[in-house]
Image (cartoon, helix red, strand yellow):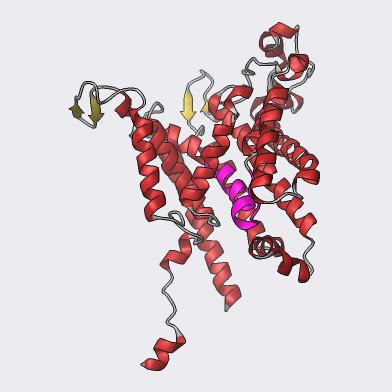
Amino acid sequence: MKQNKSKKGLVIALIAIAALLAVVIVLENTLKPTSMLFTVLKKGAVYSLVAVSLNLLNGFTGLFSLGQAGFMLLGAYTYAILTVPTASRDTVYYLYGGSAVNFSLPELFGGGAAGLIVGVTLGLILAGLAAAFFAWLIGLPVLRLKSDYLAIATLGFAEIIRAVFQWDKLGPVTNGANMIKSFPTFTDFNIKDAGGQVVLRLSTFFPFLVAVICIGIIVLLIHSSYGRAFKAIREDEIAAEAMGIDLARHKMLSFCISAFFSGVGGALLAMYSNQVQAKLFTSALSYELLLIVVIGGIGSVTGSCLASFLYIAASEWWLRGLDEDPFVIGNIAISAPGFFRTGLRMVVFSVIIMVVVLFFRRGIMGDKELPNLFKPRKKSKQKEAAK
């Protein structure tokens, strides 16, 4: 019976995911490409992946880390450095007389559509591996720490790696404090005809597809024996060790896996921004991601995904008009000179966050997932006996 239910749930999940991806394609090819909706969808997909990877570490393993911005930086730079076209490298690295890396992954696989797909896919994987490798290096000494000390150590790592990547001596590789651009982005996945006109837009579908695949892998991991070991470490390390769980090994595994998907998310964020610059990956980015995890619910994959889209929609779209006078809602314009001004959006946004935290102390979803909300609650044995 349990196997039948799990298979049925898997089929329903796959159908829902396929329907979601189909809706994204339809919307992208129906609405105007300049609509803010696509900004929310693209950036929300990227943030949802990184938030879920952070939740794997903070929510499911109980390790408090603030180094996600550093892992995203490693992923973004790895992807950008390896995919910039060779013809554009002299222009991008003009201050250093060219790039130390003289190849481009899409070009290595023949260019064209096939080379783009294979090259970008390999670039995303290498971005994750680079972040995971550095996570393994710093995890050796850092994972012996607990709670606040671990958070401070990982935050320090993120700031150090950001400063190192702006070091002028590494300019031929990282371009120093300058930005790297001209690498493949989401818009390169739009299908064009012989005249260069777009016939099928897939620039929003691509980040959704990558995020869905990566989050699906994380969900499978959470429901595996490794995921159960992570949860046991979160609940009680002493009891978990007594049950035969290797604490050091499983903590390192969770740390590296979280870093891997954060690196992939960093590469996707670079594709969304069309550029990479170290100063964009500050500690504020780690705080944003932690806030998303808390709002969605620590220990809930669904909560992290929902909170990511809500956070991006509120900060980038719905409340943006508060920074200008008049404030426009649809066809209605509200004017209040001196009230609607630059910065009001963040004030209102902060108040909304405070309200959410006060009334949803465990987040929007708590530790529940979306399918569990539709299951009827089981009556307790005491109530049944009373009847």
Please state which of residues 348 and 11 is positioned toward the viewer in this rendering: 348
Q: Residue at x 50, y 35 (%)?
A: 43
Considering depth in this image, is 284 or 150 the residue closer to the camera? 150
Instruction: Say which residue appears at 54% left-offset and 33% top-offset.
Output: 284
Residue 120 can be seen, yes or no: no
**Taking the image as drawn, is residue 284 in sight?**
yes
Whether 63 is among the magenta residues is: yes
Percent across and percent down for residue 190 are 52, 29
Q: Quadrant of the N terminus?
A: bottom right
**Principal SS element in the magenta part?**
helix
Res. 326 image quadrant: top left
For residue 349: magenta?
no
Taking 256 as reference, is 75 above or below it?
A: above
Q: Residue at x 70, y 29 (%)?
A: 160
- Name the residue: 35% across, 31% down: 345
Which of these two is toward me, 144 or 114? Answer: 144
Q: Is residue 290 left or right of residue 95?
A: left
- Magenta-highlighted residues: 46-65
Where is residue 31? Give x, y as percent: 36, 33
Q: On the rendered image, what quadrant is the C terminus found in?
A: bottom left
Q: Taking 83 as reference, is 4 above or below it?
A: below
Where is residue 358 drawn, in percent x and y? 39, 52
